[in-house]
Image (cartoon, helix red, strand yellow):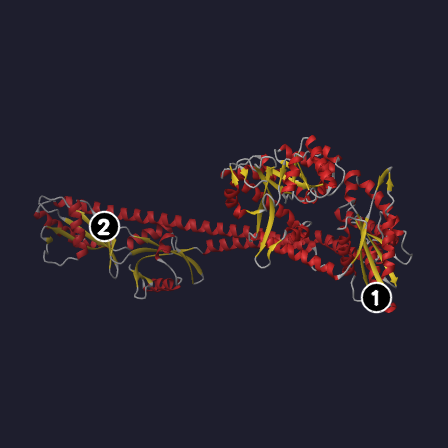
């Protein structure tokens, strides 16, 4: 993999992007602040100009009031004096026009205009007169037609009922002149704002200006942007470029105006301010660009040397992965330079580490070749026993299968394991177990030829590959010799172990057979041999595979059966032998298949016994049995017990006591109403562990029974250590007590021995009255069998109880 973009290049790019972003942001902020300052200054100018206009209006207004007031006082306030006042004003008209820009002057009494009452009066003037007479105050009004005229109304004190009013009209020239001189603006005029038919705004000059100025203002109006708004001109004004000048155009509204919105147009030359602002913005942008390029150059000069060094390291390090050590050293020597600075940095450390790594890897390469050979040997042989392992075995099987077709010879695979080896590990520890495996490996290797291969497959499993076999008789001979080898005990650390082996054999001469297939067949045969309780061998045939397939199929069907409620219980009564009192029932599992009909427990229990599903089914039996105890209790049978058979897997399951406790609490039944039945085989396989589990169950209050007593082991001595409540005598002994003296003596002795040990005896399989009477004579406690009752399906239990039980006693007990 090659470097496309170096890390330092990415770093430089990111840093430059950050610096550029900061420069742009700062420049933008400074420019916006500059524009904001100008805008604020324009707004302040607008406010100041508005105040000046108001001040000048007030001055002119006050001056005119004072002048008229002086003239009116000289003339008096009666009717004759109004005529005299009118003549005085007419005589002063020329003076007023020249000095005060008075255009017209009217004196109003109750009849109209004095001296000419029939003279028509402008409605604007008439309205102004009425307002003045109503408020007794002087009023001013700006009225615009083609030209804006400023009207001032002045009330005159008189003796009549109607207040005389003098109305003076003046042009806006004096106001414009005063404002222009006071503010030093470029141009000033009165304009009107009108809305055109096309919803566009336009301005029109409404004051007396020269033709040149009128043309200038029209050019100014045309230069306004297309999207200009009257509010923008009033609030802050707008910048317009005209005749190489930057002009600020703004409008001031008149407070006392009528007509078409007159405004005072102010044109200021702001070219110098605009140039100053542009110069400031240019300085800001130039400074930002200059600083950016200076920083970029410094950053590149500083980081570029690191970029070169990093690229060098990134090019050389892949050579170590490719074991090109000489090229690595050559390139490193060519590119080695004296550092600019004497201080060691991270790259110096990385380069030094890379060089050290190169030397170490070169050394490891040599050692690796040596170790590889050792590892290859270890990969093919078992570390504990020294025998070939599974890898070597698979390789040899493939090799032998390939050559078998050419030589017309058989290939045999013998799969074996040590019977009950797990108990050795559990009892004596894995160290002793390992020593036992090593001793077993030596014995397994003895009977075979040098051309054969004995291997350890895993755990306590061993496989022997027999090659070049002419007949199956040779395989039988080897299998018998192997079994014979383990007849003598194995002594490990002074402890004697009697170990047997179970052997499964698969034989083939088919070249297309696979190692996996051959091993599977031998494994299936080995489990067939284990079913014979050890020290046996079996040769694989097709029926074994069929049996395995049937087992898988049966397990699948059984899982469906549990989901579909195909399982049920049959209850076989247990009674007291002497009295016939109903003591309880034994719960027996039944399977009613929808297609196959009733499937016998003898058919499906052995096949499911070693599957994971068996544990699930066992717990279903406990759940159903405890539920039936509750139903019996609620129906008038409060003390009956339910005997439940436990499999080996369920008995050894750590969750059994907790599950039992939950079911007892859930169904509100007494613990001693639950009796768990265990076979001898389960108990004596690990007597110490079995005793502990049984004691835990008894501590809960549940009862325990040992089932099929006498069939597994002839010795009764282990009974002393088992905390059981009942011993069940197997039906094989009960069946012959009437005809066989030996069986009769065995049953009698067993009953006496068990009763003396404080336990009760339950006889199974009572079918005749003679058997019943003999068991009563032997003082057997409880009994069950066809003589008393066949197992009763749970759906029929209430009908049978109502027919067979009276006052708690079984009617046909004898």
Q: Residue 545: give x, y in percent of width and height.
A: 72, 59
Residue 726 image-quadrant placement: top right
Query: For the residue carrying disc 2, how many other residues have a C-alpha within 10 Å: few (<14), some (14-19), or many (20+)?
Result: many
Say which of marks 1 and 2 sits in front.
Answer: 1
Residue at screen point 83% across, 49% down = 356
Along the horizontal axis of the image, is 87 left or right of 244? left
SS under mark 1: helix
Which label is found at residue 431? none
Name the outermost residue toward the right. 450
Along the horizontal axis of the image, is 555 left or right of 504? left
What residue is pinned by disc 2?
140
Q: Residue 8: give x, y in percent of width and height.
A: 69, 54
In this rendered view, identify the residue nearer to me: 135 or 168. Answer: 135
- Please tell me whether residue 640 is drawn above or below residue 442 in the rendered image: above
Along the horizontal axis of the image, is 33 left or right of 791? left
What residue is pinned by disc 1?
402
Q: Are marks 1 and 2 in contact (CB under 8 Å)?
A: no
Residue 627 image-quadrant placement: top right
Q: Residue 419: give x, y in percent of width and height.
A: 79, 47
Quadrant in which the C terminus appears: top right
In this rendered view, identify the residue nearer to me: 656 or 265. Answer: 656
């Amino acid at each position: 993999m090659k470097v496309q973009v170096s890390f330092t290049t990415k770093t430089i790019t990111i840093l430059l992007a950050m610096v550029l972003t900061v420069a742009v942001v700062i420049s933008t902020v400074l420019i916006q602040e500059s524009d904001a300052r100008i805008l604020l200054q324009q707004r302040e100018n607008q406010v100041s100009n508005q105040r000046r206009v108001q001040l000048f209006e007030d001055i002119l207004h006050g001056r005119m009031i004072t002048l008229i007031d002086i003239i009116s006082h000289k003339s008096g306030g009666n009717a004759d004096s109004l005529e005299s006042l009118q003549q005085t004003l007419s005589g002063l008209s020329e003076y007023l026009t020249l000095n005060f820009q008075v255009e017209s002057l009217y004196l109003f009494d109750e009849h109209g205009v004095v001296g000419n009452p029939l003279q028509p009066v402008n409605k604007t003037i008439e309205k102004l007169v009425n307002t003045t007479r109503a408020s007794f105050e002087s009023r001013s009004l700006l009225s615009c037609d083609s030209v804006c005229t400023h009207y001032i109304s002045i009330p005159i004190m008189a003796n009549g009922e109607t207040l005389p009013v003098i109305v003076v009209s003046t042009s806006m020239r004096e106001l414009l002149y005063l404002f222009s001189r006071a503010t030093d603006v470029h141009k000033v005029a009165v304009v009107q704002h009108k809305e055109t038919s096309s919803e566009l705004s336009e301005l029109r000059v409404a004051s007396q200006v020269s033709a040149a100025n009128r043309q200038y203002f029209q050019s100014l109006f045309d230069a306004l942007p297309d999207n200009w708004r009257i509010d923008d001109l009033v609030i802050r004004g707008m910048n317009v470029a005209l005749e190489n000048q930057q002009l600020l155009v703004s409008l001031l509204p008149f407070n006392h105006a009528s007509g078409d919105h007159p405004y005072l147009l102010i044109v200021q030359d702001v070219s110098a301010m605009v140039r100053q602002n542009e110069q400031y913005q240019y300085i800001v942008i130039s400074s930002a660009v200059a600083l950016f390029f200076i920083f970029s150059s410094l950053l590149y000069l500083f980081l570029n040397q690191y970029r070169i060094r990093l690229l060098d390291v990134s090019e050389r390090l892949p050579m170590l992965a490719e074991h090109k050590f000489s090229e690595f050293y050559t390139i490193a020597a060519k590119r080695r330079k004296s550092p600019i600075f004497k201080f060691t940095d991270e790259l110096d450390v990385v380069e030094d580490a890379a060089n050290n790594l190169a030397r170490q890897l070169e050394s490891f390469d040599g050692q690796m070749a040596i170790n590889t050979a050792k590892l290859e040997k270890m990969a093919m042989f078992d570390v504990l026993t020294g025998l070939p392992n599974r890898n070597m075995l698979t390789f040899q099987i493939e090799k032998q299968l390939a050559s078998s077709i050419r030589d017309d010879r058989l290939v045999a695979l013998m799969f074996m394991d040590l019977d009950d080896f797990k108990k050795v590990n559990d009892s004596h520890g894995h160290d002793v177990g390992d020593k036992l495996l090593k001793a077993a490996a030596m014995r397994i290797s003895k009977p075979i030829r040098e051309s054969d291969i004995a291997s350890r497959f895993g755990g306590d499993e061993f496989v022997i590959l027999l090659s070049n076999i002419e007949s199956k008789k040779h395989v039988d001979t080897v299998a018998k010799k192997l079994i014979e080898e383990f007849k003598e005990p194995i002594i490990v650390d002074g402890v004697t172990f009697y170990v047997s082996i179970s052997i499964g054999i698969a034989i083939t001469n088919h070249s297309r057979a696979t190692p996996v297939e051959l091993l599977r067949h031998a494994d299936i045969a080995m489990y067939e041999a284990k079913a014979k309780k050890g020290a046996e061998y079996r040769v694989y045939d097709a029926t074994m595979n069929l049996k395995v397939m049937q087992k898988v199929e049966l397990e699948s069907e059984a899982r469906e059966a549990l989901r579909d409620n195909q399982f049920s219980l049959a209850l076989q009564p247990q009674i007291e032998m002497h009295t016939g009192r109903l003591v309880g029932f034994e719960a027996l599992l039944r399977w009613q298949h929808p297609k196959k009909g009733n499937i016998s427990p003898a058919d499906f229990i052995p096949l499911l016994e070693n599957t994971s599903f068996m544990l699930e089914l066992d717990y279903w039996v406990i759940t159903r049995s405890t539920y039936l105890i509750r139903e019996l209790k609620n129906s008038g049978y409060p003390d009956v017990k339910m005997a439940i058979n436990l499999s080996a897997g369920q008995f050894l399951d750590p969750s059994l006591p907790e599950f039992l406790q939950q079911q007892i609490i859930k169904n509100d039944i007494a613990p001693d109403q639950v009796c768990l039945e265990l076979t001898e085989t389960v108990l004596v396989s690990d007597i110490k562990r079995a005793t502990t589990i049984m004691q835990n169950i008894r501590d809960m209050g549940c009862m325990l029974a040992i089932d099929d007593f006498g069939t597994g082991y002839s010795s009764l001595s282990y009974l002393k250590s088992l905390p059981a409540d009942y011993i069940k005598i197997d039906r094989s002994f009960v069946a012959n007590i009437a005809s066989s003296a030996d069986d009769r003596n065995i049953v009698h002795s067993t009953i006496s021995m068990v009763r003396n040990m404080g336990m009760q005896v339950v006889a199974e399989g009572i079918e005749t009255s003679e058997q019943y009477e003999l068991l009563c004579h032997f003082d057997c406690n409880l009994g069950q069998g066809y003589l008393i009752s066949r197992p009763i399906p749970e759906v029929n239990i209430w009908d049978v109880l109502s027919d067979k039980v009276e006052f708690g006693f079984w009617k046909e007990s004898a």
